[in-house]
Amino acid sequence: MSLILDKRFLRIFFGVAACSWMPHWACHYYRLETHSTFIVGSWIFSYADSVVSLLIYSVLIAFNLLSIVTEKCRMTAAVLTGLGHLGIGSLHAYRLFYPFTFVVFGYSWTYGASLREALLVIPFGLLSLFVGVAIKRKGFHD
């Protein structure tokens, strides 16, 4: 637990957490620039959907970057990052058992890619929640 609350670890963790949202941000940015499709199941993302997604990811990135130097918002940033990654990872894991359409930039997202996504983001989501809980228990929270 002391490693999780180490100031150096937390600065690195929140830097990595900010970076962890960049692929999702870039996906929507590129989609908007190329006017390509993004489909998840029956949801065909509109221009506005991707703009809102960009805004949400931008806030998450900024919040994690702020958490590198500001202890006050670390718990919330860690918990939001954890829940967000668990949500995205769970969606990809669910797709492996109950297949549905997933199209990015006009190309079908493979099941292997969904497996890799789930294997990467679910553990990071759990780590993020663990960091948030450790910060809350120690008293470094908003």
Image: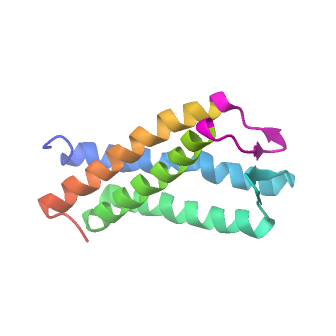
Q: Quadrant of the C terminus?
A: bottom left
Residue 116, image quadrant:
top right
Query: Picture coordinates of residue 124 (x, y %)?
Result: 40, 42
From this view, report whether residue 82 is shown above or below residue 111.
below
Q: Residue 109, how many percent across, how many down?
A: 73, 37
Q: Which residue: 86% across, 55% down?
A: 35
Q: Quadrant of residue 64?
A: bottom left
Tell whether position 60 is magenta: no
At a point 20% along the width and 62% down the height, the residue shown is 136
Using residue 50 as the reference point, say whether residue 129 is left or right of it.
left
Q: Is residue 59 above or below residue 87?
A: below
Residue shown at 72% from the left, 66% from the top: 49
* Front one among 67 and 51: 51
- Residue 99 lies within the magenta run: yes
Nearer the observer, 94 or 72: 94
Q: Quadrant of the N terminus?
A: top left
Q: State the extent of the magenta-drawn residues as a range.
A: 96-112
